[in-house]
Image: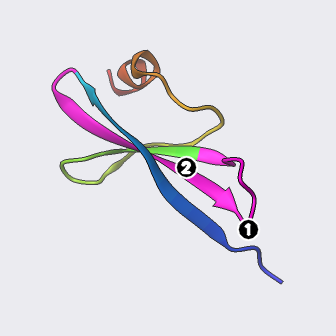
Amino acid sequence: MQIKERVRKIAVLDIDGESFEVDGHYRGQESKVSWYTVTRSRDHSVTVDHLAQFPSCDKIRSLIH
């Protein structure tokens, strides 16, 4: 039996003139986020995957530069 994963957009953050979307990934019916994914809004490319904690603007900035 497989546990279904749900994905919800948590936030859209503007960092240095560029927008990033933060998605929360949930397992089954859990209400706590299992991990976060950050994507660039303009082309939906994944910037960071499987973050354990919600990323701050400074964290995203350090990951993209």
- Identify the amino acid type marked 1: Gly
Q: Quadrant of residue 35?
A: top right
The numbered dot on residue 24 is 2
**The residue stretch that appears in magenta:** 16-35
Q: Secondary structure at mark 2?
A: strand
- The span from disc 1 to disc 2 (Cα, nearest Å) is 13 Å
Q: Secondary structure at mark 1?
A: loop
Q: Is 58 included in the stretch rendered in magenta?
A: no
x 19%, y 32%: residue: 18
- Residue 37 drawn at (x, y percent): 49, 46
x 25%, y 47%: residue: 41
Question: Neighbour class for label 2 at 10 Å: few (<14), some, many (≥20)?
Answer: many
Number of on-image labels: 2
- Residue 20 drawn at (x, y percent): 31, 38
Q: 16 and 63: which one is in front? A: 16
The quadrant the C terminus occupies is top left
Mark 1, residue position:
28
Vertical side of 63 occupied by 30: above or below: below
The quadrant the N terminus occupies is bottom right
- Residue 9 drawn at (x, y percent): 44, 52
x 50%, y 57%: residue: 8
- Identify the amino acid type marked 2: Gly
Q: Is 23 included in the stretch rendered in magenta?
A: yes
